[in-house]
Image: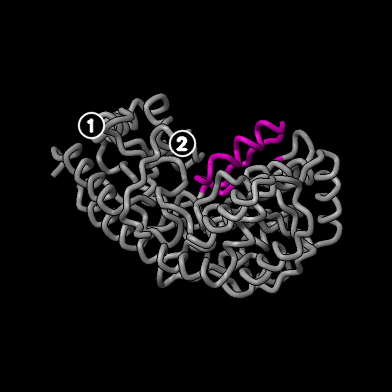
C-alpha cells in the first residue's frame, strides 16, 4: 500500500472526520480534518494479517498466555531503542490516557499536585482535574525554534504538595526530541522534589531523520521513581485498539500499580494484544521506517509552505506528525486567526489553549495524511492569509 492512497474515513465512526463539523464548524463534505492524533493511513500489513487470522478463526475469547506478547515488546525496545527491559515489569492498560489515569490514581491522593511542562498533551490535565488532583503548570520557553525548560523557575514554583511529574517525550505538541542532558535535568528535578516521574513515550518511534530518542529509563539515578509508558498505537495507527504499556522497574511502585489494577478489575482486550504482538517484528519495523520517510516529506512540505506566510511560524518538527504553528506575529486575535483557518481555509486543527499555558497563540495540525491533502491544506492556508503576503 502507498501512503499516497486516500482512504475515505467519513461515515466510519471516525471522530477525526465525522466529528469536525460539530466541534469546529468545518463542513464535513469539503473540510480537511487535521486535529485528532491518528493517521489517515492503513496500518502495517503484518498487523492487518493478524487481525484477519482472528476474523477467520471467528472465536473472540479471553486471551491466555501472553509470553509472546511480552517478548515482542522486549525485542522492539531492545532493537529500536537500546532498552533491555524485563518482560515481568510490563502492565497493559486500555491505552496511555488510561495508563496516565492509573498512575495518578496509584501514586497520588486527592488534592496532590501533578506537574506538567506546558503546553502539553491536553488529556493529562483532563485526567488530573477529573481525579481531584491539582495541575501544576511549569510553562516552557520557546527559544531558537524549540522548547526549553527553566528549572530554576520550576524549583521556585514547588510548594511541597506536588507528588508526580508527567513528561511527554518526544513532546506533543511541540515535536521536540529531548536530549540526554534535558532528560537528566528532568530526572534531577523529580529527585529534588521527591516526585514520581511518569514518562509518556507514545511517540518514541515517530522520530524524524537526524534525531534520536532516548528512553528516560536509560538516564542515571531515576529507576526508583520512574514509570515508563509506551504503546504500539501511535506508531502503527491502531489507537482504536486502546492498548498501552506501563512499565515499572521499581518493585515498590510496581506493587502499588498492580494493586490498583487488581482493585479495578482491569485486564487488556485480546485485539490489542494480538495486534501489538504482530506489529513488533522486523516486518513492522520496515513499515515504520517507510512511514517516517513519508512523514518527513510531509513535514518539509508543510513547514516550507506555512513559514512562507508572513506572521505564521511552524516549530521545527523533530518527532511526531503534529505540526505546532504560532500565529502570534500576525497581530491577530486568537478568534480571528482561528476563524480564518476554520471558516476561511476549511481546516479543523486543535486549539492551542487546550494544551495549557503557552499555547494561546498556536494551532496544532496533524500532517499524517496523504501528501496531496497536505498540499491542499497549504494552498488553503496561503489563500486564507493572502492579505499578509
Find residue 30 and report its horizontal and vertical position in percent. Answer: 26, 33
| In the depicted structure, whether residue 248 falls above or below residue 126 | below
Q: State the residue at coordinates (13%, 38%).
A: 387
Q: Report the magenta residues as a range.
A: 113-139
Tell which of 288 and 341 is nearer to you. Answer: 288
| Applied colour scheme | one colour
Say whether residue 342 is left or right of residue 177.
left
Q: Quadrant of the C terminus?
A: top left
Give the secondary structure at mark 1.
helix
Q: Which residue is mark 2?
A: 14
Q: Nearer the viewer, mark 2 or mark 1?
A: 2
Tell which of 151 and 9 is nearer to you. Answer: 9
Residue 344, disc: 1
Q: State the residue at coordinates (59%, 48%).
A: 55
Residue 315 occupies which quadrant of the picture? Answer: bottom left
Observer able to see residue 115: no
Find residue 50 and report its horizontal and vertical position in percent. Answer: 58, 57
Please rate how many residues cluster around mark 2, counting C-alpha atoms within 10 Å: few if below 14, some from 14 to 19, many from 20: few
Find residue 321 and report its horizontal and vertical position in percent. Answer: 42, 54
Asked whether 136 falls inside the magenta stretch, the response is: yes
Asked whether 15 falls inside the magenta stretch, the response is: no
- Spatial separation of the CA atoms under disc 2 and disc 1: 24 Å
Amino acid at each position: 500500500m502507498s501512503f499516497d492512497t486516500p482512504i475515505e474515513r467519513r461515515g466510519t465512526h471516525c471522530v477525526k472526520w465525522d466529528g469536525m463539523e460539530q466541534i469546529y464548524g468545518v463542513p464535513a463534505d469539503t473540510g480537511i480534518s487535521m486535529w485528532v492524533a491518528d493517521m489517515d493511513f492503513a496500518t502495517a500489513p503484518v498487523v492487518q494479517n493478524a487481525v484477519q487470522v482472528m476474523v477467520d478463526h471467528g472465536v473472540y475469547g479471553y486471551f491466555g498466555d501472553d509470553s509472546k506478547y511480552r517478548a515482542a515488546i522486549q525485542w522492539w525496545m531492545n532493537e529500536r531503542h537500546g532498552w533491555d527491559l524485563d518482560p515481568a515489569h510490563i502492565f497493559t492498560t486500555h491505552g496511555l490516557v488510561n495508563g496516565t489515569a492509573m498512575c495518578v490514581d496509584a501514586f497520588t491522593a486527592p488534592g496532590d499536585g501533578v506537574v506538567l511542562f506546558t503546553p502539553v498533551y491536553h488529556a493529562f490535565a483532563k485526567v488530573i482535574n477529573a481525579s481531584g488532583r491539582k495541575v501544576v503548570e511549569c510553562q516552557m520557553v520557546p527559544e531558537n525554534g524549540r522548547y526549553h525548560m527553566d528549572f530554576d523557575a520550576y524549583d521556585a514554583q514547588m510548594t511541597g504538595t506536588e507528588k508526580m511529574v508527567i513528561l511527554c517525550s518526544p513532546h506533543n505538541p511541540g515535536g521536540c526530541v529531548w536530549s540526554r542532558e534535558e532528560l537528566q535535568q528532568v530526572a534531577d528535578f523529580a529527585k529534588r522534589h521527591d516526585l514520581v516521574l511518569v514518562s509518556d513515550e507514545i511517540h518514541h518511534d515517530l522520530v524524524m531523520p537526524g534525531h534520536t530518542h532516548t528512553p528516560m529509563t536509560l538516564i542515571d539515578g531515576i529507576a526508583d521513581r520512574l514509570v515508563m509508558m509506551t504503546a504500539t498505537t501511535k506508531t502503527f495507527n491502531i489507537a482504536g485498539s486502546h492498548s498501552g504499556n506501563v512499565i515499572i522497574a521499581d518493585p515498590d511502585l510496581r506493587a502499588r500499580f498492580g494493586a490498583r489494577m487488581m482493585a479495578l478489575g482491569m485486564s487488556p482486550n485480546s485485539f490489542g494484544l494480538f495486534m501489538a504482538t504482530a506489529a513488533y517484528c522486523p516486518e513492522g519495523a520496515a513499515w515504520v521506517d517507510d512511514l517516517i520517510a513519508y512523514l518527513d516529506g510531509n513535514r518539509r512540505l508543510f513547514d516550507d509552505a506555512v513559514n512562507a506566510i508572513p506572521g505564521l511560524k511552524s516549530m521545527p518538527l523533530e518527532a511526531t506528525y503534529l505540526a505546532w504553528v504560532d500565529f502570534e506575529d500576525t497581530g491577530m486575535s486568537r478568534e480571528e486567526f482561528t476563524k480564518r483557518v476554520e471558516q476561511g481555509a476549511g481546516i479543523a486543527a486543535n486549539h492551542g489553549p487546550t494544551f495549557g499555558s503557552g499555547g494561546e497563540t498556536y494551532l496544532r495540525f496533524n500532517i499524517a495524511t496523504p501528501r496531496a491533502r497536505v498540499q491542499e491544506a497549504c494552498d488553503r492556508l496561503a489563500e486564507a492569509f493572502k492579505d499578509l503576503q
